[in-house]
Image: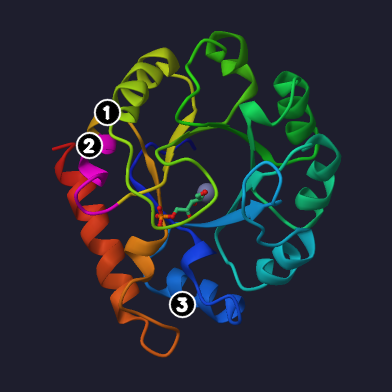
């Protein structure tokens, strides 16, 4: 059943890259709803992370939803390999190529749920033509490529407009970038339900001391839910 309640999706971009399996287990044990996996190609974005083999390897350490954010271009030829790696949701960028409609079709055909990411400079003009193709829209609240950047406040109005466009459709709104205890309430009130957070979840903790992960997740969730009350 579709669930619009607040979900916290820690981004493993802020985890210990030498310890992904243990980090995934730790954040789930500490209350993460989804695990957000940032794939970067050094071309679409100026940073390089990992590919499908790494996603397949960490899949075994994730019990819940593996949310794979592809910051790669071209994207279509890579979709199948991320579906085979066990992604539950595959998100592609509208800006990654000229044929986003085909890309979203290919994601659904792979068996994964389809996510559509929008850079901060991208408007909502294409949405009426894509709403029937997506299970999630990811509003980037930083320019993609790096963790630990400052939240771009102008995106809150975009989230509100997107929430209106979605209406009763079973489409999640995910926020990615600069989510903290301070910014989470703004986007939750505007209609977002999936909050990605890297630095704000992992700060102060480690696999040997994971309790801060749990405290951080709880603080972000409580702040977001308070904005809905
Ligand atoms: C940015 C990534 C984000 C990033 C978020 O390109 O898509 O998922 O890890 O990190 P924070 O929460 O630190 O902004
Ligand atoms: Zn991301």
Q: Report the residue that reaches farthest toward the bottom.
A: 208
Q: Position of residue 190 (x, y in %)?
A: 27, 28
119 is within the stretch colored magenta: no
Secondary structure at numbered mark 2: helix
Is disc 3 placed on a helix, strand or loop? helix
Quadrant of the image for the C terminus?
top left
Left or right: 164 in relation to 86: left
Residue drawn at point x = 57 percent, y = 66 percent: 63
| Up-down relation of residue 223 to residue 100 (above or below) | below
Q: Residue at x 65, y 21 (%)?
A: 133
* Side of 85 where 70 appears, left or right: left
Q: Which residue is mark 3?
A: 26
Q: Residue at x 36, y 26 (%)?
A: 159
The correct choice, above or below, for 137 with respect to 158 in the image is below
Q: Which residues are magenta?
A: 180-188
Question: Which residue is more in the foreground, 105 or 17?
Answer: 17
CA gap, disc 1 and disc 2: 6 Å
The image position of residue 155, as x and y in percent, is: 35, 29
How far apart are the two marked residues, 3 and 1, measured between alpha carbons?
30 Å
| Magenta span contains residue 187 | yes
Residue identified by numbered label 2: 186
Q: Which residue is mark 1?
A: 190
Q: Are marks 1 and 2 in contact (CB under 8 Å)?
A: yes
From the image, state whether disc 2 or disc 3 is nearer to you: 2
Task: Using residue 217 as the reference point, say whether residue 182 is left or right of it.
Answer: left
Q: Residues within 10 Å of mark 3 (few under 14, many from 20)?
A: many
């Amino acid at each position: 059943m579709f669930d619009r309640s607040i979900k916290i999706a820690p981004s493993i971009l802020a985890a210990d890259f030498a310890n992904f399996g243990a980090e995934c287990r730790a954040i789930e044990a500490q209350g993460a709803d989804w695990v957000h996996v940032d794939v970067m190609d050094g071309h679409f974005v100026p940073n390089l992370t990992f590919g499908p083999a790494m996603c397949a390897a960490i899949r075994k350490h994730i019990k819940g939803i593996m949310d794979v954010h592809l910051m790669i271009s071209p994207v279509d030829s890579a979709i199948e390999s991320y579906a085979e790696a066990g992604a539950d949701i595959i998100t592609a960028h509208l800006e990654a190529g000229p044929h986003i409609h085909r890309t979203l079709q290919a994601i659904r055909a792979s068996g994964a749920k389809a996510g559509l990411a929008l850079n901060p400079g991208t408007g909502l003009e294409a949405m009426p033509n894509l709403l029937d193709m997506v299970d999630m829209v990811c509003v980037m609240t930083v320019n993609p490529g790096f963790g630990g950047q400052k939240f771009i406040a102008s995106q809150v109005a975009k989230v509100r407009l997107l929430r209106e466009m979605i209406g009763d459709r079973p489409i999640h709104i995910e926020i990615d970038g600069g989510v903290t205890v301070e910014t989470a309430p703004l986007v939750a009130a505007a209609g977002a339900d999936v909050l990605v957070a890297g630095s704000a979840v992992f700060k102060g903790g480690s696999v040997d001391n994971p309790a801060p992960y749990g405290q951080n997740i709880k603080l972000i969730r409580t702040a977001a839910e308070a904005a809905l009350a």
